[in-house]
Amino acid sequence: MAHGAPSSSITDNWSFDVFVNYYDLDASSFFRHLYPSLLEKGLRVSSNYAVIPKGEEITNPHVNSLRKSRIAIIFFSKNYAYSRLCLGELVRILECFKKEDKLIYPVFYDVDPSEVRHQTGNYAKAFSGLEERYGVKRDQIEEWRRALSQAADLSGYHFLPKTTDAHECIRAVVEQVTSWIKKKREGEEEEHDDHKKKEEEEEHDDNEKEEEEEEEDDKVMPLGTLSSSITDKGPYHVFLSYCVEDRFYFTDLLRFCLHGEEHLVFVREGIRPDEDITSTLFKAIHESRIAIIVFSKKYANSETCLQELLQILESFKEEGRWIFPVYYDVDPSEAWARLEERFKDKRDQVEKWRLALSQDYHSLTKTTDIREGVRAIVE
């Protein structure tokens, strides 16, 4: 299953499995490593990072992605309380999740839980500043304080960067999340199977002829196969082609933001070990509406990338779909020179490809504001 593809659940009314609430300036580095780990488990992830522009306003799409998530991971960090966005988001999480019996999992990132619970230390300074500098009303302050106290009382994980291994923390968080989701899905499947069984029994009682009963039985899906059968077999929105060796934070963030906009994204790391890689890649390319090709310095060195590129150019040319090239940390002329070197016997063809892809593209360097670059591509 491709990363970002909905996992096999029976009545999957959720757009996301996990919503992550965190203060970017404190925890972005940690989140950068947590996010791919969640994706590797086939989980769909959303966060304020993907849907909130710079500023503090909570938008309707943001609230919707929060409500449509099964789990909320809250990263309490030293400067968390300085963000009105994070605090407002926390209130929404507590309101939405407790009503629907969903999981709220706090991670105390380089901060003591008691500091969050009682708003001491940095949290006390933050609230003082919110009141004095921004003129936040006392009622609002009290609502945020109550939310912090309630959330800090929940069972979670205390991470201290100086004494705790970050990989161990990520493993523990991912394990907790996947375990909870597995139990919920098993419960949903059992409930769905019970409902299906009841329907079958009622249908059997109503049938007067044995032939009709057999015909109806043939239509009934065997118990235990529903989970793998009721999956999204529709086409992918986006096929993302990029070199794994050049796997930059930019690529992970691009995938994340596309998921945040509820686009179904195919990436080759999501191919199961029992699947044929080539046929699966070509099938996904054929089913995708858009192909984003991330040209990087080592892109032309990857045989898989070159196979993807050839298939994209052939498939999309015939069907008139959209190819969007992105040049990351490489000049377009350098990227195409490398491709010409790899396709020495097809240089005329490579030139045609270059011209075909020269109308609409995006170029980024390591000094570019990555967040703005990704937003421009997603838009």
Image: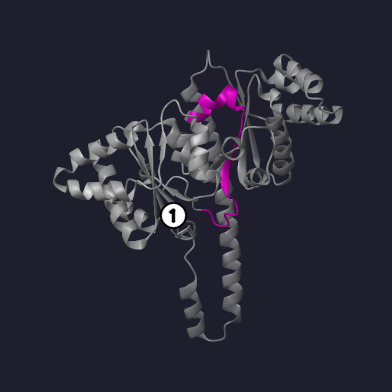
* Mark 1 residue crowding within 10 angstroms, few (<14) / some (14–19) / many (20+): many
- The image shows residue 197, relative to residue 283, as above or below, that is below
Residue shown at the point (27%, 51%) measured from the top left: 278
Which span is picked out in magenta? 9-32
Residue closest to the eye, 362 or 235 = 362
Q: Position of residue 42 (x, y in %)?
A: 46, 44
Residue closest to the eye, 134 or 287 = 134
Side (left or right) of 326 relative to 59: left
Q: Is residue 98 visible?
A: yes
Q: Position of residue 241 (x, y in %)?
A: 35, 44
Q: Residue 110, located in which quarter of the rendered image?
A: top right
Residue shown at the point (36%, 54%) measured from the top left: 284
Q: Position of residue 266 (x, y in %)?
A: 41, 48
Is 28 within the magenta? yes
Residue shown at the point (70%, 15%) measured from the top left: 122
- The image shows residue 274, relative to residue 294, as above or below, that is below
Q: Amino acid at mark 1?
A: Tyr
Q: Which residue is mark 1?
A: 236
Is 246 within the magenta? no
Residue closest to the eye, 339 or 167 = 339
Q: Secondary structure at mark 1?
A: loop
Q: Residue 243, located in which quarter of the rendered image?
A: top left
Q: Position of residue 236 (x, y in %)?
A: 44, 54
Side (left or right) of 364 relative to 47: left
